[in-house]
Amino acid sequence: MTNQNQNQVAVIQKDITDNVNNSLGRLQEEGLILPSNYNASNALKSAFFKLQETVDRNGKPAFDVCKRDSIANALLDMVVQGLSPAKTQCYFIVYGDQLQLNRSYFGTQAVLKRLNNVKDIWANVIYQDDVFEYENNSGREKLVSHQTAFENRDKPIIGAYAVVKTADDEEILTVMTKKEIEVSWGQSKTKGAVHNKFPQEMAKRTVINRAAKAFINTSDDSDLLVQAINNSTENEYDEDRPRKEVNTQEEIDQNANKETLDFEQEPTLAPEQKQPKEITPEPTPETMTDPSDDPF
């Protein structure tokens, strides 16, 4: 990348970082509390490093094709949830002219533990020939036992389960069969492409997301945190919904009128991607940027 291009990227980075920090400051005034060990500035620097490697399905850099406000929204959702790309807790995907944030399996675990009513959460895969037992106790499913063997890990997956440990030390079980998991994957924007590449960890993430829904939307935590969690979860699925914008309309108009970057970048592999439905009805998924970006 030339010095001129580096300067252009630096200008964009400062512009968006200022917008995100201003919005984050307003949200903190409204009651948002970030994790005590979370450094938003470091997370943003890590995110911009990853974004310089992120391309769309045609190999064009995210900075060239994505609207500035969509980049700011994705980064704001990241810091509100206390996530960092450096810890493989999240990754970015280009859909048309929009940048969206997706959580990894690790990221989903981390963000759910921030909820006041969740003490811990974990998930396991059930393989063929495992002995899995659970019971229905007063209307709630409860894990009885799960016996497995090392050699079973190479056998077909038949299901997965997640256990949420509440603040009262109650353990609540959520179970999904392989068919239920595949139905969920079929509704994703990547149509199961990433899921088929990393089935074990993606099955865990799918069942954790299902288990978390009731806790997220009945939580007494900040609505701002809950909204950011739901935003990232819904980014994976083909559904339209309104998004809370980071910028004011005036800022968006100003950004839209700024000169678009025009620099060359070696195409690198990016996360599984596709264009939105209104742009392309039959998207072709792509691959991840590098092994560290595996979605778990």
Image (cartoon, rainbow, N blue to C red):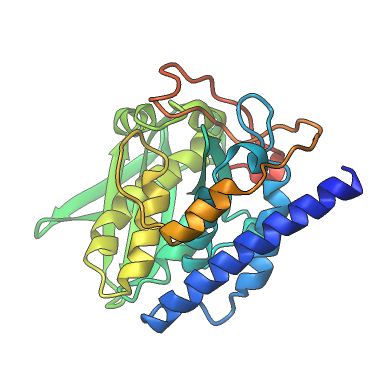
Residue 261 lies, in percent from the top left, at 71, 42
**In the displayed structure, does residue 52 sit left or right of residue 21?**
right
Which residue is nearer to you in this view: 260 or 144? 260
> Which percent across, then down, holds residue 178?
35, 31
Q: Which of 134 and 223 is in front in this view?
A: 223
- What is the count of numbered marks? 0
Q: Which residue is drawn at 75% across and 33% down?
A: 268
The front one of 143 and 84 is 84
When the figure is inspected, residue 293 is found, relative to residue 167, above or below; the finding is above
Query: Which of the pair 292/179 is nearer the observer?
Result: 292
The residue most toward the left is 138
Q: Which residue is drawn at 65% across and 56% down?
A: 47
Whether residue 208 can be seen here: no
| Outermost residue, right side | 3
Percent from the top left, x then y, of residue 182? Answer: 36, 28
Task: Report whether 255 appears left or right of 207.
Answer: right
Residue 15, visible in the rendered structure: yes
- Whether residue 29 is situated above or below residue 17 in the rendered picture: below
Q: In this view, does 191 lie to the left or right of 214?
A: right
Q: In which quadrant is the N terminus drawn? A: top right
Give the x, y percent position of residue 134: 24, 49
